[in-house]
Image (cartoon, grey):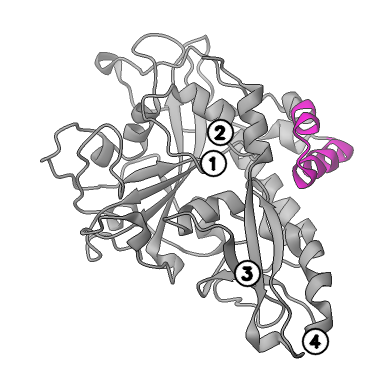
Amino acid sequence: MEVFSEEAAKYVWGGAIPLQIHLHESEVTTLPPPPPALVLGSRIGYLPLLVPLIKPYFSSTLPPGEDTVWFDYNGLPLKWYVPIGVLFDLLCAEPERPWNLTVHFRGYPGDVLTPCDSEDTVKWSYINSLKEAAYVINGNCKNIMNMAQVDQFDLWQSLVKGNMDGYLRISSRLKLGPVGEDCFLKQASSLQPRQAIDEPDTVGCSRPSRIPVRLYIRNVGESLEYLEDAPIIDSWDRISYINQAVEIHKEGGNYMTLKHAMRTLLPEIFGDEDPDKKYELRGEGNHEACSSFGDQETISTARNDLVEETSFGSQRPSEANLIRIQGIEPDLNIPFSWVVNNLRNPDYFLHLCVFLRTSSHQAKAT
């Protein structure tokens, strides 16, 4: 299997969610009300980037006042800095096409969402994520900090316009990947405490590589049989979020699969094949729970508030226990290097949505 597949990358960059966007009824000033706007939202893009398309469509019916645009799904204000594809995979347990969203031009919920005044706000959020990823991968973000302004502008424009070739041309200078095929698990007999991210790099080829991962975890209920019956998410407090680096090694051990990576991320859930065994989720050292959400809005505080008991019965999750990456529910035995190189977002994070079957009192985010 190729380390980097141009065909797979094109599918990721070309991926889009059909959106049916309704103007909130409180902002309709004309009769009849305007029909919903139909647009395609790039999976790797962000909701505020759709405003130039949507605003002219609804402008003639808006009440007077200053525009502060935001979106909701079933009453839940949507995080503008989370990629559209991630929001869709996470909030639509059973994919909804078109995805029905509501747009608001008034009444910005500042208690839930951080301000987003313009496209520049989204751009700098993306650049900050890129810095964070670079720091995880290299131990510093000098390559991002030292980017020429013109390269920074062109990199952002390539994302806005869906120009994969332009993005690859510029991002290749940042020395953030790709991950090689020689991705191994470290032998259990030689496991050592993981190097802190701000410690000096180990000399030699044995230095582990770090893959930045954003993990979004949603509880769908203990007795759920079909995902289409999953309860609606009405608060971000019901989504748990973990920012973490997955370490891979260049020598020794076994080739690393997605299953191995999930055991690293959620060892108490994916770490045992026994379907009758219960796991208690405990916080560990090197986990950055709510790293990004926590900087902007607090979603959850610790992994041990996420799940106390859960069970997984097979190598692949059941219908109510699954992983989604870029809209795909992948086989857990796929090489992790392929997943990283071909399914990560342009911010160099691998965004993973995980659905867990646990009781509501057990999967409680604070």
Q: Residues within 10 Å of mark 2 (few under 14, many from 20)?
A: many
Give the secondary structure at mark 1.
Answer: loop
Q: Is residue 2 above or below residue 265?
A: above
Q: Is residue 308 above or below residue 168?
A: below
Residue in the image at 49% along x and 51% along y: 89
Closer to the chain start, of discs 1 and 3, is 3
Q: Position of residue 333 (x, y in %)?
A: 36, 24
Discs 3, 2 touching: Cβ within 8 Å: no
Discs 4, 1 touching: Cβ within 8 Å: no
Magenta residues? Answer: 148-169
- State how far apart marks 1 and 2 are (Cα): 7 Å
Q: In this view, does 23 lie above or below 259?
A: below
Discs 1, 3 touching: Cβ within 8 Å: no
Residue found at the very far right of the displayed protein: 150
Q: Position of residue 146 (x, y in %)?
A: 79, 34
Asked whether 346 falls inside the magenta stretch, the response is no
Residue in the image at 80% along x and 86% along y: 65
Residue in the image at 19% along x and 45% along y: 311
- State how far apart marks 3 and 4 are (Cα): 18 Å
